[in-house]
Amino acid sequence: MSNDYADNTTMRSPLGRVRGLGSAKGGTHHWWMQRVSSAALLPLTIWFALSAASLAGASYETTVAWIARPWNAVLLLVTIGISFQHAASGVQVIIEDYANQEWLKMGGILAVKAICVLLALASALAVLRIAV
């Protein structure tokens, strides 16, 4: 014995059913990217911390030579890119959770992303100037 009304009733809007999105819209992707970037940052941060510790007290020339090695330059660039993406994503979540007005959310998110992009580009340019 089945209830036809209960079987055909859904809490999702027709547009939501077509797009396949729940109430959170694209939040699952954002959450997943946070986890992937944090997992990628774990070994990169350990590598960077150990490398920085080994360079403690080294001369400027030694440090520049270390950055100029291709493997180190690539890992530094990857660390820079993932770190700023992860930071921007994390601050975006904070802004979305605590900003009450839509214009404040959008303005804050755009400002954070712009700052992170500019800082990432400046950091990458510094590494590339030394490495190339």
Image: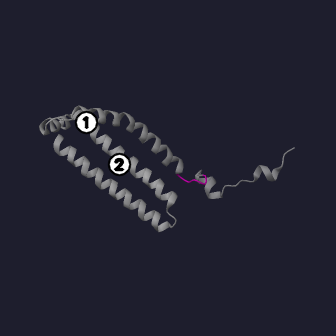
Image coords of residue 86 (percent x, y): 40, 47
The segment highlighted magenta reads 22-26
Magenta-colored stretch includes residue 24: yes
Q: Residue at x 83, y 49 (%)?
A: 3
Image coords of residue 84 (percent x, y): 35, 48
Q: Amino acid at mark 1?
A: Ala
Secondary structure at badge 1 equals helix
**Which marked residue is nearer to the observer: mark 1 or mark 2?**
1
| Looking at the image, residue 101 lies above or below residue 25 | below
Query: Sequence-wise, which precedes: disc 1 or disc 2?
Result: 1
Q: Amino acid at mark 2?
A: Phe
Image coords of residue 103 (percent x, y): 46, 68
Q: Residue at x 25, y 47 (%)?
A: 124
Give the overall secondary structure of the magenta segment.
loop
- Is 30 left or right of 111, judged from the image as shown? right
Identify residue for label 1.
Answer: 52
- Is 61 left or right of 108, judged from the image as shown? left
- Is 58 left or right of 19, judged from the image as shown? left
Q: Which mark is residue 84?
A: 2
> Can I make out residue 111 in this image?
yes
- Quadrant in the picture for the C terminus: top left
> Can I make out residue 132 in this image?
no
Q: Which mark is residue 40?
A: none
**Marks 1 and 2, how far apart in space?**
19 Å
